[in-house]
Every structure is written in structure tokens, then in C-alpha cells.
Image: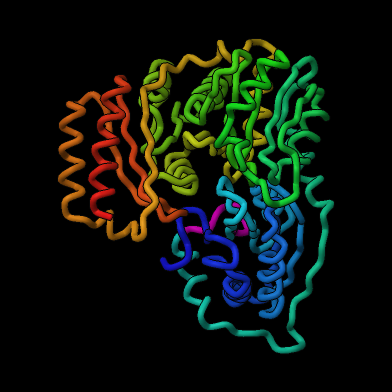
Amino acid sequence: MEYFGTDGIRGVANEELSPTLAYACGCALAAIKPTAKIIIGRDTRISGDMLMLSLASGATAAGADVTDAGIIPTAGVAYLTKKLNFDYGVVISASHNPYEYNGIKIFDKNGYKLNEEKEAEIESHLNSIKLAPHDKIGRFTTDFSLVRLYENYLFSCLSSNLNGLTIVMDCSNGASYKVAPFVFEKAGAKLIVLNDDCSGKNINEECGSLHPEKLAKAVKEYKANCGFAYDGDADRLIACDEKGNILDGDVLIYILAKKLLNEGKLNRSLAVGTAHTNLGAEEALNNLGITLLRSDIGDKYVLEKMLKENAVIGGEQSGHIIFTEYSTTGDGILSSLLVASLLKNSPLSLLNEVKLYHQININIKVKDKIRIMNNEGLEKEIDKVRNLLKGKGRVLVRASGTEPKVRIFAESKDYNLSLNAAKQLENFILNIE
């Protein structure tokens, strides 16, 4: 598709992602479903207002009614879309990307991200805008109080309070900056909150789930029970135990899958990961009698696999974790609440029984990622690297679904083996460029 990647439409604001494109997207939603009801939320980026108003203008011009829910995590929009019977939920966010980027994520009436067929249908309308007759123009309203419904729902997912816990929280200067502290404090936790600014130009900047180093330092400094870091739209979670050790999504899936298993809630003893899920996490899950199924990279593909296999937990190493009992998409705040609920009985360091393999990830910015991936010699080079690993690890090369990058992944128990494998592929790709 021309516009949609693995997680909606994404690009630099006023460049790849213009107000004109957002306007056309709003028109397309109304064209597909006349008189649609649409809820829109966004993160803190300065371009969020512009793109929200552009999309809302297109949607109302084509006959839809639009409600602006303000700054709210992605999972909050998904929840409200289903609960309040909206036809579409739209999130204006570029998730973990720098502030100059923005994006458009779209949920259906059931709170699920649109599948590729629906995205293709939207694309088919982007270049043929049709406006509603003057008497069928839609209305635009603002209701920033709707976020309270989401906050109350998050609180209801806790089975016990968090009294006595001290938690460091990094809100990444993003959409979680009010919601996460409110819910945790309501649950009784003592908080040290980092990066809760909403100025719009520093979202994800050296903070949040992509940069948990300061979080780890603060956890040790304040002698906290744990730390939680979200990304810009709070659909990811990276944690830190009381000793300052970083726990990524693979480890958290292990911990939470074991929780569900002990509670008798882990249907079919399954968990879903991706091609990047660490082999060490898979081995640890297997030791519990849990089977790990793998999907393509991308949380919507994880969810697709979960629904197909009737699995109740799945996610990505990046911290997208989905619980079908509670949510229709990744929710970093929900995940952190469920992890925190375990800490009344055990330190987080003792819950981590995963011995991770060494993984090397190299991202190469390229002019044409499709040309790189279609290079005739690349597959031969990948085969050479696989022979180098000698069955002791894995290597993957893929085009990014959201950025002009080629991503290299190598994994084994031997750090140097993983590094050499990744570097060999990096050198080959750089020579193509």
C-alpha cells in the first residue's frame, strides 16, 4: 500500500504526513460509512492539533460526526471506541518516533486496529474526495472528560491495591503523562514521576521505553520497588526491577504468562510472540509448559495470531503486550498495573527467570528499502551468515514498516557470534547503497 505501514500512516509532519492527507483520510472514513461517529485522540506532539483538526474537518465535511477526546493513550481510544459505540477510533500519534513524526492509527467499532483489507479500502478513497450535501455536514464536539472512563477502567483491572509500593515512572513526555500517575496514585502507590512534560517538542527524547537508563538509575537512587517506562502513546512498556535491571517485553510476557498460568487463566497454555522474541524467553516459557507461537513483526499481527489460536496473552520485545481479557490492543499502563500487582508478594528481580540470548539489532537508514530487500545478492549473503551461526542462533533482515530503514537482527548465546553476523550483513547492505 502507498500510505499504510505496519501501524497505520506515519511520517514527518507537513512532509510525508500533511494536513491534506489527514483531511483526505477523514473524508475516506465518512465515505466508507456515511454518518459515521468518530472519536479522535492524540499524544502530545505539536503537530497533533493540526492533524486532528484536519482529519476532523475532512470527516465532518463528508458527513461524519467527530468527538475530540484530547490527549489520551492509544489504548484509551480503542477502549472508548468500543464502549461508547463509535464507528471508528482514530489516534494521532507516531508512537515511539521523535516529535517531528506523527501518524494516524485507526480502530474499528470493536476496538481493533483495521486489517489490511480495510486500510486498502481507505486508500482507494484518498484521491477521490466526496463531500456531503450542505444539509448532511457532520458536527464536531470536544469532550476531554472521556479519559476519566478509561482511567476508571484501568483501575478496575486491579484485584488489589498497591499500598506500600514505591514506583518510578517515565511518561516519555507523551500521552501517559496524566493518566498513568493518576491511576497508580489512586491505587495507593508512591510515585516518582519522570518526563511528564506536554510541551510537544520532546516526546520520546532520551526518555521513555526506548531509553530506560535514567529510569534504572532513579529506581536505585530512590530504592524503589520497580520502574515503568512508556513510549509516546503508552502502548509499550519497558520495566526495571529493584536492582536496576531492565526488563523488556519478552521478559514481561514471561512473567505475566506465568501469572495467568498460576491463576488458571492461560488458555491452551499458549503465549504469542514475534520473530524477534528472544529464544531465552521461549525456553523459559517451555520450562513452564507454555508454548510460544510466533507471528510477523507488528502488534496487529500478534493480535491476529492470538485471535486465531485463542491465546490470551501476546506481545513484542518492544513492550507491546496484549491481554484479550482486558484490551483489544497493546496497553503499557495496563501491563504495568498487572506487573505491579505481583510485587506485594515478591521482588520483581525474583519473578524474572529468563536467561536471554544475545541479540544484536542494527537499523540502517536507506533511500529505498524495497530495492535493498529485493537485491539478488542479499539472500545469498543471509545464507552465508546462517552458515556462520552453525545452527547456534538466528538471523533476520526486514524492511521497517514505519520508517525508511532496513533492520538487521542476529541472535545466539555467544555475543561475538551475534555481533559478527549482524556486522557482516550491515557491511553488505551499505555496499548496496
**Residue 325 makes an appearance in the image:** no
How many marks are shown on the rendered structure?
0
| The stretch drawn in magenta includes residue 176 | no
The x and y percentages for residue 1 are: 41, 66
Q: Which residues are magenta?
A: 105-115
Can you say whether 143 is above or below 244 in the image?
A: below
How is the structure coloured here? Answer: rainbow
Q: In the figure, residue 428 lies in which quadrant?
A: top left
Of residue 418 and residue 236, the one placed in the foreground of this image is: 418
Residue at image coords 62%, 52%: 99
Left or right of 341: which side holds 364?
left
If the image is split into quadrants, where does the C terminus sit? Answer: bottom left
Q: Nearer the viewer, residue 219 or 321?
A: 219
How would you classify the magenta stretch by its main secondary structure?
A: loop
Indicate the position of residue 103 as horizontal and vertical percent values: 58, 58
Left or right, residue 398 beside residue 157: left
Residue 34 in the image, given as x and y percentages of width and height: 64, 76
Q: In which image quadrant can residue 341 be found?
A: top right
Kindly tell me whether residue 8 is visible in this rendering. yes
Q: x, y (%) of residue 256? A: 55, 25
Residue at x 56% of width, y 10% of height: 350
Left or right, residue 212 beside residue 382: right
Left or right: residue 82 versus residue 387 is right
Residue at the spot x=76%, y=55% of the render?
Answer: 70
- Of residues 418 and 280, the one drawn nearer to the viewer in this rendering: 418
Query: Going 49% across and 71% down the picture, which residue do you hit?
Result: 123
Q: In which image quadrant can residue 323 be found?
A: top right
